[in-house]
Image: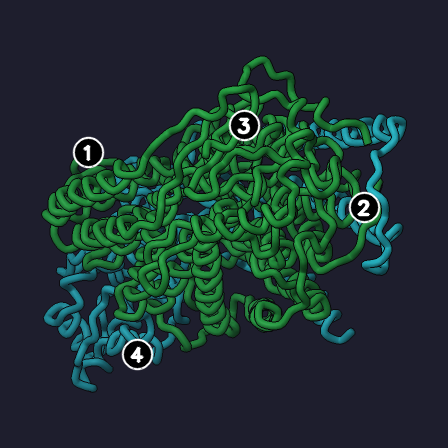
Amino acid sequence: MGVASSIMGSALASCSGPQNVLDPAGPPNRSINHLFWAMLVVAAIIWAAVVVAALWAALSRRRRTREDLEPIVDVPNEEQRRHVGIVTGLVGATVVTLLIFLVYDFTVGRALAERPSRSLTIEVIGHQWWWEVHYIDPDPSKLLVDANELHIPAGEPVQVKLKSQDVIHSFWVPNIIGKRDLIPGYTSSLFLHADKPGVYRAQCAEFCGLEHAKMALPVIVHSRADFAAWLAEARSPAAEPNDSSAKEGKKVFLAGACSSCHALTGVEAYGTIGPNLTHIASRRTIAAGTLPNTRGNLGGWIVDPQSIKPGARMPSNQLAAKDLRNLIDYLETLK
Amino acid sequence: MTNPARRLPPNESAVTDPGTLPDATPQTLDEDLLIAEARQLEITWRDPAGLWGWLTTVDHKVIARRYIITAFLMFIAGGLEAGMMRLQLARPENTFLGPDRYNQIFTTHGTTMMFLFAVPIMTAMGLYFVPLMVGARSIAFPRLNAFGYYTYLMGVVFMYVSLFINMAPDAGWTSYVPLAGPEYSPGHRIDVWAQLVTFTEIAALAAAVNIIVTTFKMRAPGMSLNRIPLFVWAQLVVAFMIVFAMPAVAIGSTLQLASDRAIATHWFNPAEGGDVLLWQHVFWFFGHPEVYIIFLPALGFITPIIETFCRRRVFGYTAIVLSNITTGFFAFGLWVHHMFATPIPELGQSLFTAASMVIAIPTGVQIFCWLVTMFSGRPRLTTAMIFLLGFFITFVNGGLTGVMLASVGFDKQVHDTFFVVAHFHYVLLGGAVIPLFAAFYFWFPKVTGRLMNETLGKWQAWLFIIGVNITFFPMHILGLNGMPRRIYTYLSETGWGPLNALVSAGAVVIVVSVAIFIVNAAMSWRGGALAGANPWDSYGLEWATLSPAPNYNFLNTPVVLGRHPLWDTGSPLPVVTGLRSDRREVLVTTTFDAQPDHKHKHPHASIWPLVMAFVMVELWIGSIFTPWAVLGGVGLTLLVMLGWGWESSMESDVERVATEGRIVEAA
């Protein structure tokens, strides 16, 4: 009983959370949820009816011994006719149920397919195994390149254009809407429409190689005003370090291996193989949603990424202790 | 009983006069003569002695038995891989398997279960029972049959050797490009997958052709199309599906993927004008029918088991046949529902939504017919019947989530998550493996001559049903909670830990159940109760011969007067004589009405099928390392075909039967 209730408990608890289909954060997923629960209830009733019928048929007139050899007889015509009626009726009911599902699904699909005439456009580019995010602006100089975190305003549909740099990935924010694949050679798009500000979690949903499991993307839904403020802040170039250790750290960054893969806006670091680190210190996680962004994790990740995320493109970095400390000091100034 | 012969189909030709059949029967019932004839047939149809005979046999029962055992070993191997995955996922951030090993294991699990277990074991059941159920001495193309098995076996060995030398495929059983392409999967792992698929394709096509021709041309006199057992109907529909589906994956994996990898073509390379979605279309055009190729034969097992244990003829024979055929058609119109998350236009997607829902109807028809049959009879809850209750409990669940997944909006939420993993395991375990176990218990006595232990069987059945539900039901919730499939680990913050632990515990129950089955099968094979010809008092022609069936299957070809021969006419069945006992002959009948047409000389044991399978090894495995192996392989194939054909030409011989209005002994 204890086991059963704890299972029930965790089943109920499983209707909420930052990465949960059943905890909608916007109108599209709310209508998907309505569809889901409606289909689930109907399906549960059908399942129960079939199972009860099967058990009833098997148990009610069962023969208990091998010796009980029921004679093989033809079912009388009158009963046959009744059977024809029953089966026809059940098939008819199946057809009607499916038709209702179909029409309901099409209605939901039509609602989901609605496109606003104007919207904020964000480009998400999949890499093995991280996310590059471009906030598009009609003024090209205002293009914001960010990574591994997605910020959107609440209350309006935001267009997300999806591309892939290498293999197929899939972009999926369960609380907001269903997934869409990022396919090399194709650009696809979907609309994120959230109305509940909060932090949600997206995760790659198409197997993309070794670290498919560690390719997540925190999605932060701001109120409209907060989003504007965040965007302005994020467009600012990398902060200049003030204290000496951070200044030393910047030198390590530019002279060492870091800048060959990572870019810092406003600083002479142009690498595009890895995520842009202009505002690394304000991100919640590192390594694509794998670790909380703490000083210790940052250090561990720089020195030995291969034991945290085996196969990741980031190589291990043998740095002197002092250099490492300075580098982390610098990265922590990049708010 | 009225004279059953009068119900034979109208017969204009002079080949047989059914009226004379019952008169002919008493003449052949002389006991001494029968024993002498049986002894002669035994000698005629026997394999050469020793290892040579073992390697050259073309007896469809021997080949199919090996097929079933090999495929079942693959079920165990795939199950062990699943067990390793469940160990790894039992708790968050576990380190039992790293990503590289895990990816190989889950890919091998899927590839094994689909290509090396499910399809082969279902066709193997057909290769064993279709000739027995249609009353034939043997199968249509026995050497092709042996070749098919050996090719499959080579594929099995190839795959598992690769796994142990760290060369197993690791891009999923679907091998999506570009991940599986030359740029992102260097090395030979994906080549192993691509050519393994080729081996299993060839084997499946060989089996399909055999089942089609055996069903159409070798049925016992009187078994017109509308009297074919439903087991055989299901096998026939599936054989046609194989013929249409396998070429798609052959083009995809061999022509396109393998040549992209081996000789730098650019079918799937967008940089050179190729298209990565093309692979998904080609793969799923095969991959979706594949599911029904696995599932329909299992539906074929269910009908005779229900009829036998409820002791009623099934309600709606015609409806079930039409359902099978309809399912076979629609199965080819659903593939895009695996691709709803790709940029395919929404109008196109909605067509596939509708088709995916429509296919529920024929399956519903069959389920309703079985329920009505059960209600009209008096069931006995044997192990096989308990498994069928498990079928209703488990499969119907999977079918209903399948209907839910047809909805584009909902599918995009749970596509590629554990919800889908739950769905297809419910369908495949509930709709194929559970009926397969029922079939094992039901037909085991026909294969071994002994009954399986029912007490152990019932324990196994309930444990299996419970285990499957504990293992796979929580996966629905995990998927809705955002857990994608094919991940080797997850963070504890996700909250997926407790349900994953429960899932892994369920897997233990399945392991126990399968272990009980293995013990039961081994013990019963050695010392189970002797079964006799027809232990369940069933009706099909397979129960009209000894258990296990002799190497010549039937002493005399039975004559069929209804859909349930042993129930319609009682035992012994009326027979036709005229096939010689001093040489291998089979009776060929007409496609629609199964009237005797001619006698066909049947091949003897031959080593060529095995040799040809080795040529396939040279060709396909060699092609991984150098494209020149294909040229060499083609040359060798031609040489072996010469040898094979030359040997056949020495014995091939078609003889028209019977002159004077009935089948007579030619001697």
From the image, tell me which residue sits under label 1: B273
Task: List x then y, in percent, for residue A167.
Answer: 29, 49
Q: Is residue B80 visible?
A: yes
Residue B45 located left or right of residue A246: right
Residue B116 located left or right of residue B1: left
| Of pointers 2 and 4, the one earlier in the residue sequence | 2
Q: Is residue B331 shown above or below B549?
A: above
Q: Nearer the viewer, residue B203 or A246?
A: B203
Residue A188 located left or right of residue A3: left
Check contact, mark 2 vs mark 4: CB within 8 A.
no
Q: Is residue A203 shown above or below A116?
A: below
Question: What is the C-alpha distance between the residues marked 3 and 2?
Answer: 50 Å
Question: What is the C-alpha distance between the residues marked 3 and 1?
Answer: 64 Å
Chain letter, disc 4 residue: A
Question: What is the C-alpha distance between the residues marked 1 and 4?
Answer: 42 Å
Q: Nearer the viewer, residue B407 or B506?
A: B506
From the image, tell me which residue sits under label 3: B663
Q: Is residue B494 shown above or below B123?
A: below
Give the number of the disc on residue A5.
Answer: none
Q: Determine the secondary structure under disc 4.
A: helix
Check contact, mark 3 vs mark 1: CB within 8 A.
no
Observer-side mark, 2 or 4, equals 2
Task: List x then y, in percent, for residue B264.
Answer: 13, 44
Image hue for chain B? green
